[in-house]
Amino acid sequence: MADLLRSGNTMLNMACPVCSNPIFRNRDGKTFCPTCNRDVKVVKSRPHQDNVIKSEPNIKEQEKGYHYDKQNELINSLEEVLLEKIEIITNKLKNENHLQLIETYTNILINCFEILNTIQSKR
Ligand SMILES: [Zn+2]
């Protein structure tokens, strides 16, 4: 028993269901009975397992939140860029008399506003 403790095992406050000797836990967290020389499943470890299961969706939610923030950040900067372009094109359009260029500029404006509408309708 002393050897078991010296080699990094922990004696648990539980008895083996077969031989009633104390159960040990090794460094890997595995519980075993050194007398029967077999692994023992500790029922008390179930709440711990529940915690592990619970923590998984939490991590996923955090990741989801991260992706959501990232997406929001991207959409916000896209909106900003589009508004800048709209301003630039509007100023160009003001002094433009070439019909083809006017058509090109207005087409770009239509596209910009379409994207802006899509962005704003998703909020
Ligand atoms: Zn045993």
Image (cartoon, helix red, strand yellow):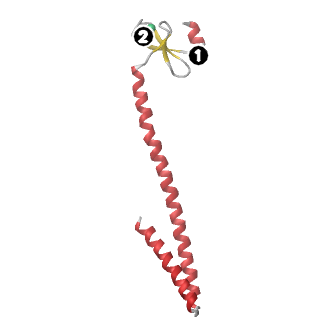
Residue sitting at 44 percent across and 14 percent down? 13
**Amino acid type for the residue under numbered disc 1:** Gly
The image shows a total of numbered marks equal to: 2
On residue 62, which mark appears? none
Left or right: 26 as drawn, with respect to 19: right
Percent x, y for residue 66?
50, 51
Residue 84 image-quadrant placement: bottom right
Considering only vertical position in the picture, is 84 above or below 3? below
Residue sitting at 54 percent across and 66 percent down? 77
Percent x, y for residue 59?
47, 42
Q: Secondary structure at mark 2?
A: loop
Q: Earlier in the sequence, mark 2 or mark 1?
A: 1
Percent x, y for residue 82?
54, 73
Considering only vertical position in the picture, is 117 above or below 99? above
Considering only vertical position in the picture, is 79 above or below 7? below
Crowdedness near tag 1: few (<14), some (14–19) or many (≥20) residues, C-alpha within 10 Å: few
Q: Which residue is mark 2?
A: 16
Crowdedness near tag 2: few (<14), some (14–19) or many (≥20) residues, C-alpha within 10 Å: many
**Amino acid type for the residue under numbered disc 2:** Cys
Q: Which residue is mark 1?
A: 8
Query: Ligand 1 is located in which of the four quadrants?
Result: top left
Quadrant (top left/top right/bottom left/bottom right) for the N terminus: top right
Residue 28 image-quadrant placement: top right
Residue sitting at 45 percent across and 46 percent down? 61
The residue nearer to you, when weighing 60 against 114, is 114
* Disc nearest the viewer among 2 and 1: 2
Percent x, y for residue 71?
50, 59
